[in-house]
Amino acid sequence: MAERRPRASLSRESIVDAAIELLDRDGVPGLTLRGLAAELGGGLGSVYWHVSGKDALVDLAIDAVLGRALADVEAMRSGRLDPGKLRAEGRVDAHEPAVAEALTEIRRICLAVYRQLELHPWVAPRLATDAAVMTNSLRAFDLAGRELRPLGLTDTGQFSAVLALFNYVTGVGADMSGHHRYADDDRPPEPPIEVQLDAWLAASPGELPFLEAMRSQFLSHDPYSEFVGGLDLILTGLRAQAERSA
């Protein structure tokens, strides 16, 4: 049984931190305010003093997770954190130094957010629907949008670019969480993609030539490398648009 925390630690921050630990362990379905209060060593009323209910607590937990991603970005900017520790090394090349720096910074933001989605697989599905109510989600969106300014895109182009980036990050994160045993739904976990692929190919021999040719890629794929590859394709497109604008 987990050791109870002293009652003195019952602040909103400690409640949110404890909720993140429980969510990492049990997922959204396994989180209850009564269970959280028991872990904290306080009464249920102490939890309700700080949060109005489970949904509000999950939103606060996601916001805190995104805050960690933003803190990592700021630490990289100031040199207090090695980008390699977040697997965020690598720059985006461009003719204009300002464009290269902007796209490199956007890459860091996306990789920092993705790292938190890896660490906390329950975040992405909820983030995809409730992002607008979370302060740090809006901060991340705004930060990436400001970095797009040097690219010379129209307002519509900038807005579409930020949407595409964040939809990609959260979409990949949500897909990743679908294979997690604590996904927030009642469906059984899906079999590995290579098992599904072999079933499709066996059911439709000769009808899926591209998938058949890519079978070895499915068998050897690395989710993180695939995520980075897709992200860099989006950034390459943004660089091309910036060069056309220039």
Image: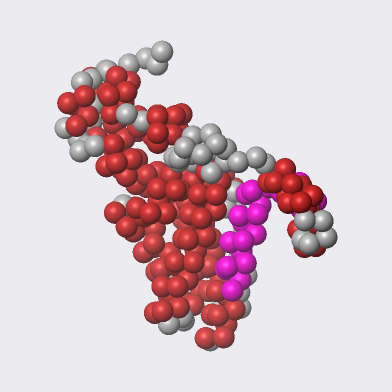
Residue 231 in the magenta stretch? The answer is yes
131 over 232 or under it: above or below:
above
- Residue 207 visible in the current orientation: yes
52 over 78 or under it: above or below:
above
Report the residue at 46% width, 29% height from top: 25
In this view, the residue in front, 91 or 162, is 162
In this view, the residue in front, 189 or 170, is 189
73 over 27 or under it: above or below:
below
Which image quarter is the N terminus in?
A: top left
Residue 140 in percent (x, y) is at 39, 58
In the image, 239: left or right of 60? right
Total marks placed: 0
**Which coloring applies here?**
secondary structure
Instruction: Look at the magenta stretch and give its main secondary structure.
Output: helix
In this view, the residue in front, 234 or 144, is 234
In the image, 166: left or right of 83? left
Residue 99 in percent (x, y) is at 53, 74
Report the residue at 49% width, 66% height from top: 164
Tell which residue pokes out farthest to the front in this image: 203
Residue 160 in percent (x, y) is at 45, 73
Report the residue at 33% width, 40% height from top: 58
Residue 32 in the magenta stretch? The answer is no
Residue 7 in percent (x, y) is at 23, 19
Q: Which residues are magenta?
A: 216-237
Report the residue at 20% width, 21% height from top: 43
- Residue 218 visible in the current orientation: no
